[in-house]
Amino acid sequence: MKVLLPDSSELELPDGATGLDAARAIGPKLAEQAVLLRSNGTVQDLRLPLEDGQQIQILTTRNADDSDALWVLRHSTAHLLAEAVRRLYPGVKIAIGPPIENGFYYDFEFPEPIREEDLPRIEEEIQRELTEGRSWVRREVQAEEAKRYFSEQGEGYKVELVETAEGPISFYTQGDFTDLCRGPHLQDSKPIKAVKLTGLAGAYWRGDERNTQLTRIYGTAFYSQSDLDSYLERVEEAKRRDHRRLGPQLDLFHFSERSPASPLWHPKGMVLWYELEAIRRRENARRGYLEVKTPIIYDAETFWTSGHFPKYEDLMFKLDVRGRPWAMKSMNCPGHMLLFGSRPRSYKELPLRYAEPTPLHRDEIPGTLHGLLRVRIVTQDDSHIFCTEDQIQDEIAAVVDYARYLYGLFGMSASAELATRPDNKIGTDEQWDRNEAALEAALKLNSIPYTVAPGEGAFYGPKIDLFMDDALGRKWQMGTIQLDSQMPSRFGLTYVGQDNTEHSLYVVHRALYGSFERFIGILIEHFGGDFPFWLAPVQVRILPVGEEHRAPAAEVRDRLGAEGFRVEVDERDETVGKRIRDAEVEKIPRVIVYGDRESTGSLAVRERGGKQDTKSLQALVEEFRALAASSGRVAGGAGPQPAQ
RNA sequence: GCCGGAGUAGCUCAGCUGGUAGAGCAAGCCCCUUGUAAGGGCUAGGCCGUCGGUUCGAGUCCGACCUCCGGCUCCA
């Protein structure tokens, strides 16, 4: 038989030859360094037989940066971890141990709880295995044999995995340790040059909190020590972008134990907030949204009607005032439903787009809180679009376009997920077919790449969720676009059609920033605190060199301030060097040093980072105007400005 | 909520096997009068997260709680 190599040459091999055989046929060195076989984008164990005409690429230890090559390395390292733990902790039960982004983990049920201090000991044991050397042997077995083997070993979790396994079952054995595993794996442990156990955590068996909580050990591995070192360095660098660190440091916000998980916004943080708010209002006006404001507190009855209480009562702030039960809203929908229902509605009013950025309160459970990214006060850039079934498609498409435009202003983009019907759905399959198709069409129309999350939709309708990463690569949901016919009917809302009869309504729930809190958190990490000129809370700082320069410096400040720029003068009794440094640390985009030389009319301007230039005040104003316009302040060519 | 870790000055952190709390930066005052990333001096600043326990004595040991961090679960 023949296989195709990456350089499109053909390799003749005997029938039944494996990837390893192919590597040997090319060269002994290649065979020795081979770690994985890749074929048309999928990976395959080197020990498996090839097919006639198959396209193959052999990855070696030299592909140390290749994500598939790292994946197999880490997967094999996870097995070494399991072997080490089994040896050190008799009676431990093993669950699963996959590679993940940047590393791997393995889940165990320990007879006695272990602590972080135990990790070095386990790491040493892995090192010992590496020194001794391990090689992996693959073997396909029958389900019955696999079950028998793991029963004898007392590995109940593995038995359960065999019972629910699909396709052929394979064992990988290294030393005296055999694991149930689909593979692929390394030939042997020689390529594993750097291993580090990075953490300990609880994790539920099969991700279900009703199940036993297992102990998860996280680790990572690389083809070289220097790769591990630079990875750890990158992690440190990412931590420096953490908004929880930068926020207080840049004087944007802080948290208080007196109101856990609710930020206290400082003046500089509010500059960011109102920049976002200005964009929101400008774009809403341009796109036909109507601003409304509805109460924050409603009687409990409202949330029984809306359906929030049955599901979320425990996560809502409730009050008992004058003997009547109340709750603080955790969503804007009830208020908007009441507003819509305040009088009969005609088809001529639809689509009707209500928008409201008021804060919502949710008593999020403690373990889930995370800086600005998971808070108890959530200010959504919320909107509810009331429309007919015929209008759904256009409305969704417009919202998706809006999202793409909005994120683009910040140089950010989101990944999209289409969440489809869950098990507890209400409504007919035909409805769901149509609605899911409408969302999907809107994504395609806007050329937004997306993945489908089957069964993840809300019970009342499918949704598009938009995600962004934080500095450490964790995914956070930003925007959401949800289609719903239940909420209007719960509130008895209808519209009168052309035929003079009542019809049921659809509503699109949508938030695009998601919440101001979370969006600003991501924004801080996205820029690492180095905000572009138009967003920077302080755009220009002027440093008078001597006392006699304070007055003219203040004049420059007033001139720039009158132009709408955020300018301040630093006339502290410190050296210029010190004040420059402070401006750098505070990440202020422009610094003007004002001394004797500036009295002639030209100004010395320093960009954040150190670049210096000299120009007239007028030239400076023009430059700043251009900088401010380079983004959200002005629509940036995205259409007309709203009427004032 | 669950597993693991941590809370000492405004910030970053020292503080050994229990003996009564320390540095740098920031702050205030003074000197210097400043030219592109830290000029100098002095001063003040602490219910050592909270409550309880052990002890002659607790920042240090034990327990509970609160908050934060890494995960899991959840996320209308």
Image (cartoon, rainbow, N blue to C red):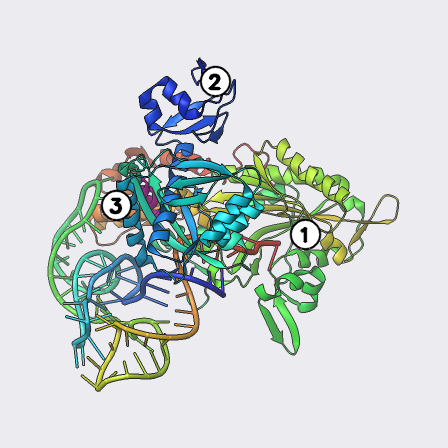
Q: Which SS class for mark 3?
A: helix
Q: Residues within 10 Å of mark 3 (few under 14, many from 20)?
A: many
Residue at the image point whose x is 47% and y is 52% from the top = A152
Give the prevailing secondary structure in the magenta stretch.
Answer: helix
Amino acid tagged 1: Phe
Considering only vertical position in the picture, is A485 above or below A75?
Answer: below
Depth check: give the residue in front, B71 or A540: B71
Q: Nearer the viewer, residue A308 or A250?
A: A308
Q: Residue at x 66, y 56 (%)?
A: A333
Label at residue A580: 3
Near mark 1 (Cα within 10 A), the count class, few <14, some 14-19 or many ≥20, is some
Residue carrying label 2: A3
Proximity of marks 2 and 1: CB atoms separated by less than 8 Å:
no
Above or below, comparing residue B20 to residue B72 in the picture: below
Residue at numbered disc 1? A459
Magenta region: A231-241
